[in-house]
Image (cartoon, grey):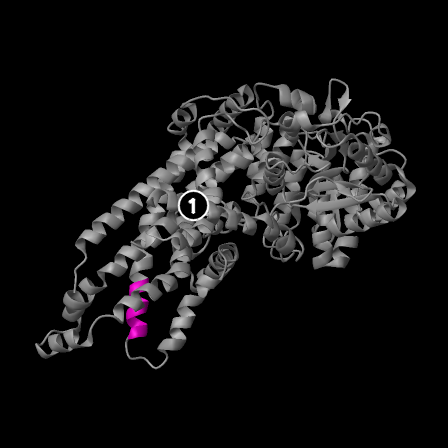
Amino acid sequence: MRNRDLAFWLFLTPVLAALIIVVIIPLLFGFYYSFTNWNGLGRLDFIGLENYVNLFNDNAFLSAFWFTVKFSIASIVLINIIGLGLALLVTSKLKSSNFLRTVFFMPNLIGGLILGFIWQFIFIKVFGSIGDLLGIESLNGWLSTTDTGFWGLVILTAWQMAGYIMIIYIAYLQAVPGDLLEAAEIDGANAFQRFRHITFPLVAPAFTVSLFLTLSHSFKIYDQNLSLTGGAPYNSTEMVAMNIIRSAFTDNEMAYAQSKAVIFFVIVAIISLLQVYFNKKREVEL
Amino acid sequence: MLKSKIVKGTLSGLLLSSLFLAGCSSSSGGDGGDKTTVEIFQFKVEFKQQFEAVAEQYEKENPDVDLKITTVGGGNDYKSAITSKFSSGEEPAIFNIGGPTDVKQFKDRLTDLSDTEAAKAAQEGTLDGVTVDGEVLGVPYNQEGYGFIYNKRILKEAGIDPMSLTTYDKLEEAVKKLDSQKDKLELDAVFAYPVKEKWVTGNHLSNVFLANEFDGDILKTSESKTVSFEEGDAFKQMIDLQNEYSVQPTTSLDYSQQVEELFSLEKVAFIQQGNWVYNTVYEMDPELAEKGIGIIPIPNGDEAKMPVGVPNYWSVNSKVDEEVQEEAKKFLDWLYTSDEGKTAVLEEFKFIPAYEGYDTEKISDPLSQEIYKYAEEGNTLGWVFMGYPVGWNEDLGASVQKYVSGDQTWDELVKETQKIWEDKADQ
């Protein structure tokens, strides 16, 4: 019942005001713009649902969306498997575990654009050279086809984000009581059974958090996409964020881009909320 | 009771936060004492430092003028930046437009410059793209040209005279000859063709084969509701030739690999680029840049003309104060018609001037000199790609990527891009 205090509201208002000014109001404006034909400058006419109708017939947008969905599924699975794996590794009794934590977390500290260029070099030059040396044809020509572009993006994102997700898993893994595991060991459970029946259910809340984070992150990726493939070949590795930017700034269709952004926002919000809701239901209380 | 407390709290909180936010309000209005502030918002990163130095020189000569220069690089970035700048109400006095397409977009902000010295001195034809109903809405930066830039040493060793490559057949023959001697000449390939860069195919190469259809007239292009690809076969031939004899895979080859790496390290004989690559090549290998490269036009069948055009124009914003507009015009006049300005344009900016009355002996680099020669002889082709419907060049570039990946045929490319042109021209 703290919120009856005057002081409570006093402390809250600056933040609330800032939030309303820079998030809520622009969001509402965005909704409004998506029903017009605004081009970023000059006049604007109200055109109702026309943008939304066009959007569902826009093959470029739909394929970008489908690509984003596929990408998100692949990267969510990969990031969480790698993240959990790394977390198990650094919480086991290794001498270098503190050093390793730092190393695995490092990629997160590099900006997405730079990462994209670094990995572009790796995929094109390094893969190419290794392919030439070992005579593996499939390592040549990375990023020049849709498939290699797709997996390139997935690998980059996994490498960047796994360390961050690892930190979340570590926090939950360290909270698993040692006596439970010990008891199981005395009862004759092997390492896999201990993980499957004790660690895993207790770490479940971490899945809720990491799935939410990885999901919203993968859906909204833009800078890695821009610097790694730039949508090449023929915009087939273009994700939704990039498609929206292209509509807005290359084709000058601000309002149309805004309607795409609204649909995008609604879909990401629905998926995220559903995921959190279902995960919450399945968590176990200790 | 509770409600009123909340209201009171919120209000007093708002008061508090308004104190925090008060610091953020910007002081607009260009009155720094009795100085006139002229805001310049321009895109050309390559000459940012030189341009700022020249602006300082101008301020020394005109102490009552304060020039504020902001530079935002890259084609796309500039356009989005200027659009956001206008919609946020921060209006620069001088900004850049690219041609008819931008004229349409910014038309209610463009001042008529036809009575300025700069506009009068502009060379024949350079103002076509920004002239509407007799009003001149921009003055040119400079001229640029593009074609096949070649490596003199490599062609000499292969026994090919670049000046003889005036038709497609001769070019193809030379390419095959080079290809057969690849190992001896230590080449990775004959070309480096960056299909990844949509503008290389979508703007530049397409211009060579579409310009004739619109009589090389940029305005005719921007008014056309359709595109016929009359010379589409020659266009396809040229893409095929460059793609086949290029370093592979072309769909992930970009500008920096093409110019900085493959061409500057002499791993390829030809690249399809323009005189803007000179500085980059110079940084990598000064000797190669000064003595070892030349440029020839891209042959279209039996015709070989150098596409020369104005990449960008300076415009004055009609929404700023009259006084500021006048100062902006004065500065542009000084930049392109005064002796100090001319020297800077030639020697500091290293531009190919788009104006009369320059000592063209002083054009700095061999590529620009070569291009200027073609321009003097009138052996040029107009730049019509600035008149394509908004974003069509990108769509064409993407379609070419699809074609070279083998995911669509040439006929499909033509049909698809024609349809996009019609849709966009209708809007």
Q: Is residue A183 left or right of residue B66?
A: left
Residue sticking out furthest to the left = A187
What secondary structure is the magenta-colored segment mainly? Answer: helix
Q: Residues within 10 Å of mark 1 (few under 14, many from 20)?
A: some
Label 1 sits on what residue type?
Lys
Q: Is residue A89 inside the magenta stretch?
A: yes
| Residue A39 screen position, x and y as percent | 55, 29
Q: Is residue B132 above or below residue A138?
A: above
Q: Is residue A54 left or right of residue B212?
A: left
Q: Which residue is mark 1?
A: B8
Instruction: Point out the image quarter for the N terminus of chain B.
Output: top left
- Residue at the spot x=34%, y=82% of the render? A95
Instruction: Point out the image quarter for the C terminus of chain B.
Output: top right
Q: Is residue B226 above or below residue B145?
A: above
- Residue at the spot x=68%, y=22% of the render? B219
Magenta-tinted stretch: A83-91
Looking at the rendered structure, the secondary structure element under dot 1 is: helix
Choose between B140 and B31: the one closer to the eye: B31
Q: Is residue A89 above or below residue B219?
A: below
